[in-house]
Amino acid sequence: MSVQDKESQMSFELHSCAHLLRRNFDRRAKAHGLSRSRWQVLWHLAKEEGQKQAELAERMDVAPISLARQIDKLQEEGLVERRQDPEDRRCFRIFLTAAAEPALEILRGLARQTRKQALVGFSGDEIKQLQELLERLKKNLVEPA
């Protein structure tokens, strides 16, 4: 197999693994009534609360109108709240409520289960090496060429 074929295969495998991780997690989350669009909003906010809606949509790589509808639903359920941006009254910042914590605990547990399944047979050193390699790959893709 040529180097070019190996690189092509590597790209396919990365894409396939990412897809399988999402699908596996989605299946687990669905059993708890958490769709991908719902859990992704909660997950991103748990990492960084107080984002503007537009910032959150960009980070999630979704259309702002789709995110707005999702936030409307989550707000109706009492899981998130919109707060006026003190520096720009046209914008809202999104925050989790205390009621979101049980859902986040479920999500964290599902993430642990999914990672555990994905990493069966990997040693601690292999997991560390994989993480370092993926971080380098991501850095290469984020920085302009």
Image (tube, rainbow, N blue to C red):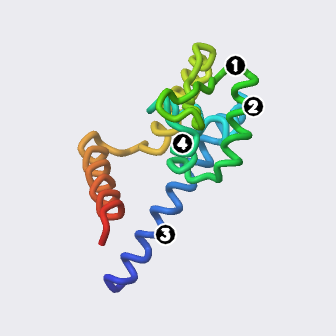
Q: Earlier in the sequence, mark 2 or mark 4?
A: 4
Q: Nearer the viewer, residue 10 or 36?
A: 36
Residue designated by label 3: 12
Check whether the beta carbons of the residues at disc 2 and disc 4 lie within 8 A of each other. no
On the image, numbered disc 1 is attached to which residue? 78
Q: Assess disc 2: are there few (<14), some (14-19) or many (≥20) residues with their C-alpha within 10 Å of its C-alpha.
A: some
Could one spot residue 46 in this view of the protein?
Answer: no
- Dot 2 corresponds to which residue? 73
The image quadrant that residue 48 belongs to is top left
Q: Between tags 2 and 3, which lies in front?
A: 2
User: Which of the two labelled residues, at mark 1 and mark 4, occupies the earlier sequence position?
Assistant: 4
Pair 4/3: label in front: 4
The residue identified by callout 4 is: 56
Instruction: Answer whether labels 2 and 3 touch (C-beta < 8 Å).
Output: no
| Residue lying at 63% horizontally and 15% vertically, measured from the top left | 99
Q: Earlier in the sequence, mark 3 or mark 1?
A: 3
Local secondary structure at mark 3: helix
Q: Amino acid at mark 1?
A: Gly
Residue at mark 2 to residue at mark 3: CA–CA distance: 35 Å
Quarter of the image with the N terminus in it: bottom left
Q: Earlier in the sequence, mark 4 or mark 3?
A: 3
50, above or below 9, in the image: above
Mark 4 Cα-neighbour bin, 10 Å: few <14, some 14–19, many ≥20? many
Q: Nearer the viewer, mark 3 or mark 1?
A: 1
Q: Do the residues under discs 3 and 1 have CB atoms within 8 angstroms?
A: no
**CA–CA distance between discs 4 and 3?**
28 Å
Residue 59 picture location, percent across and down: 50, 48
| Residue type pointed to by label 4 | Leu
